[in-house]
Image (cartoon, rainbow, N blue to C red):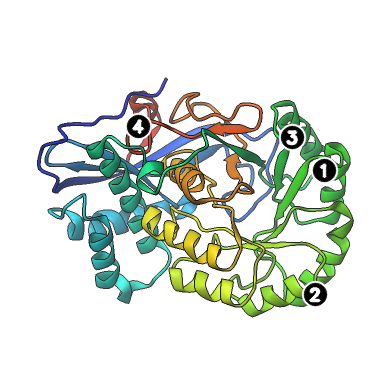
Amino acid sequence: MPVPPDQGTAGGDMKIAMIEAIVVSIPFAGGGKSAASAWGKKNASSADSLLVKVTTEGGIVGWGEAFGFTAIPAVKAAIEKVIAPLCIGGSALSIGSLMLDVQKRLHIFGRSGAIMFGISAIDIALWDILGKATGQPVHRLLGGTAVSELACYASLVRYTDPLILVENVNRALADGFSHLKLHEITVDAVREARRAAGDNVEIALDVNCPWTVREALDMSARLQPFNLRWLEEPIWPPENFDGLARLRREGEVPIAAGENASTLVEFQRMLSAGAVDFVQPSPAKMGGISELQKVFALAAASATVVMVHSFYDGPGLLASVHASAALGSEDALVEWRYFDLEAQLYGDAVRPKTGMIAVPQGPGLGFDPDADVVRNFQVWS
């Protein structure tokens, strides 16, 4: 079971005293052999996460998560050697000004990749601290919510083999999901998934940026009969927003993108180009909750639905749940990474039930990672 949040002494000094980057590798079964895909290795047997623990001088602990996967060593080094020294001694409650200062100081090293992933994790942890210090859940700090649970979709790994895919589609349906996301890149696999799921299940397809605009247009026409909710990240390079806009205008399937965008300016350009039907900011990649809430505002101005990218199991997932609950539309869905993990960072506390995930009501993110799980699966380097 998850441990209660460590609230420390709310009246203590709120300066940041320590920042720790913790690598956790939890074995999983994906329901069969997985194919190589953008997020990890072929037939990977463990899910690697980079957690960030921020502690104030008053003893309040906040937890964040950085996008990493096979890039975890680089992100961990960026946090420990570059980002953390700029944050230590700063006020944990001055999130916006502190994170902006860090971004400005480090912009010369790039506005994406390891630096931004690390900043994202620390930002999420600071929102966790703010909620604990004030006794409020993050969704209330973001404006509150009238919902206690959100619909979610089972996000499957890439299997390539249609038989294994169908087996896992059926597993997800049996677990109560009525929304699925595939990571396949062949028409045959999508056809078999639709046949297995039937017409009443929403299916999205994430192909991880493999095609030219012309190839994407051809594939969109071939995929049209399967009534996809959206086609995600179809074009290389992912920042080709004009190409995405053309595909959206001329293609046969709604378009989703955004997990590869790292700054608010990129999202502004994407939305201004009319490139997407669904925008997908990733809180562990693009600046954390502070920047995520700004994307919701941008999207609202262009009447675009936000579908937060949350291919995580830890604080990155909780950040997306809080933001979606407080700022999202009724069409928003939470991404649930459909793995059979040997252990969950939060036990069963945030596991979806009949396709719905509960919005945490405790202070901050609502839960701290289970200390036993972190200890048992921590990777030391």
- The residues tagged by marks 4 and 1 sit, at their Cα atoms, a distance apart of 36 Å
Q: Position of residue 296 (x, y in %)?
A: 49, 59
Label whose residue precedes the other's in the sequence (1 or 2): 1
Q: On the image, numbered disc 1 is attached to which residue?
A: 193
Label whose residue precedes the other's in the sequence (3 or 1): 3
* Element type where label 3 sits in the image: helix
Q: Position of residue 191 (x, y in %)?
A: 87, 49
- The residues tagged by marks 3 and 1 sit, at their Cα atoms, a distance apart of 9 Å
Q: Nearer the viewer, residue 232 or 297?
A: 297
Q: Are marks 4 and 2 in contact (CB under 8 Å)?
A: no
* Element type where label 1 sits in the image: helix
Q: On the image, numbered disc 3 is attached to which residue?
A: 168
- The residues tagged by marks 1 and 2 sit, at their Cα atoms, a distance apart of 25 Å
In the rendered image, the vertical position of residue 49 relative to residue 220, given as above or below: above
Residue depicted at x 44% and y 28%: 346
In the picture provided, is 233 more to the left or to the right than 82? Answer: right
Residue depicted at x 50% and y 43%: 325
**Number of marks present in the image shown:** 4
Q: On the image, numbered disc 4 is attached to which residue?
A: 368
Amino acid type, residue under disc 4 in the picture:
Asp
Q: Position of residue 144 (x, y in %)?
A: 42, 43
In the picture provided, is 332 more to the left or to the right than 199? Answer: left
* Element type where label 4 sits in the image: loop
Circle 2: is it few (<14), some (14-19), or many (20+) Cα within 10 Å? Answer: few
Label whose residue precedes the other's in the sequence (4 or 2): 2
Q: Position of residue 204 (x, y in %)?
A: 72, 51
Amino acid type, residue under disc 2 in the picture:
Glu
Amino acid type, residue under disc 1 in the picture:
Ala
Q: On the image, numbered disc 2 is attached to which residue?
A: 250
